[in-house]
Amino acid sequence: MFGQKALSVVFFILTSSLVACQNSGENLSSSPENRSSAGIPIGVALAETSNLALLGQESVNGAKIAEQYFNDRGGVNGTPIKLIFQDAGGDETSAINAFVTLITKAKVVGIVGPSSSQQAFSADPIADRAKVPVIGPTNTAEGIPEIGPFVARVASPVTVLAPNSLKAALKLNPKIRRVAVFYAQNDAFSQSETQIFQNAIKKLGLEIITIQKFQTTDTDFQTQATAAIHLKPDLMVISGLAADSGNLVRQIRELGYRGLIVGGNGFNTPNIFPVCKQLCDGVLVAQAYSPDHPSEINRAFRQAYVDRYRQDPPQFSAQGFTAVQVFVEALTTADKKKSLAGQLIAEQRIALNEAILAGKYDTPLGEISFTPEGEVIQKQFYVAQIRMEPNGRKGRFVFLK
Ligand code: 1QQ
């Protein structure tokens, strides 16, 4: 965790820089490193490197498509947006550094990021204190919007997402009674999700026969997998990030477990397929996005994604696109109400935050809006099952009815 002293230093740098910026009367239209030719700067602080890049890079891809899509349609009342990417890496320190750079140097109006909840709990308070709106594209742990008034998310929380996959597992195998639970104990999202899974398991009248812990950095899961298999579970439920989860599934299968496996949100990426290959087959995952969602914007997004990346967009990409979309549409609303060009950046950020929370958005995730706290309100959810080709080289998420 980040020490209190280090945090104070960060706040000091941040506050002095923001004050300097306000004193000089800097605003989006007059700052050369901001608007005019380049466009309205929106920060994107996602995991482009580290283990977390397996998930973060997909959100980056979605954000890039959004930038082009909305600029092709006139940006913000005729002014283009400009995404400023700052790699937030895989840990708290890199996320904090990315946030501070975006706020103080790039002087962004708002930030899309960070990738994980673990990072959000450290980095978001910095933006919140500086009154810079943050939209979490993929932060699903409980408590994210409650970080502060400038923090919202487009990622539906584990509370509404996770239980769907358990119900799907029971539908596929009504005989399930004994459940083995695994989670990454060094990750805020995994801790939060396993709690929701465990409550839902009990509510469904099933028995938790063991709870096995691991670290997101682990690669060897023999001890936990062997202990769980020994107890003869009918279902295994895993909360972790992508690489660890994939390796755990592979080793569980190699040790002979044949029953159903439910994976949490960390499984929501095709980047897991090369990790567990053929042995990923059959894993159930709840998703907040379907490429088949029937709307004009989703069709356009899906087509642009397929054209650029030669595959259907995964959930994390749709969420990256959506986070940028919310910024663009809220900026458009705020600018119509009172021209942003004439305002100080501090005022623009406050006007933007108000517009974000008040808006309704027709996105690739379906229609969304926000509670006054910044929690996303989303209607549709899905459950997919991983299907691998027999050679294990290619796979896809098959959506269950
Ligand atoms: C979180 C998550 C991760 C799986 C996404 C990166 O949901 O950290 O909240």
Image (tube, grey):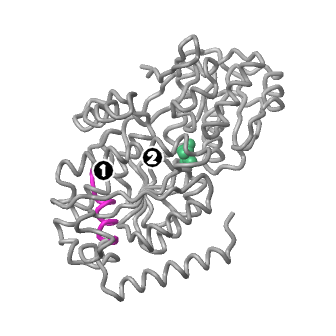
Magenta-tinted stretch: 349-360
Compared to residue 81, the image places residue 243 above or below, namely above
- Image region (quadrant) for ligand 1: top right
Residue 47 vs residue 198, the one in the foreground: 47
Magenta stretch, main secondary structure, is helix
The mark found on residue 155 in the picture is 2
Callout 1: few (<14), some (14-19), or many (20+) C-alpha neighbours within 10 Å? Answer: many
Front residue (pair 227, 276): 276
Seen at 62% across and 63% down, the residue is 93
Q: Classify residue 182 as left or right of residue 66.
A: right
Report if residue 373 is visible in the image.
Answer: no
The residue located at (24%, 33%) in the rendering is: 295
Taking the image as shown, residue 56 lies to the left or right of residue 50, namely left
Residue type highlighted by circle 1: Glu
Count of numbered circles on the image? 2
Label disc, if present, on residue 67 of the rendered structure: 1
Label 2 beta carbon less than 8 Å to ligand 1:
yes
Q: Secondary structure at mark 1?
A: helix
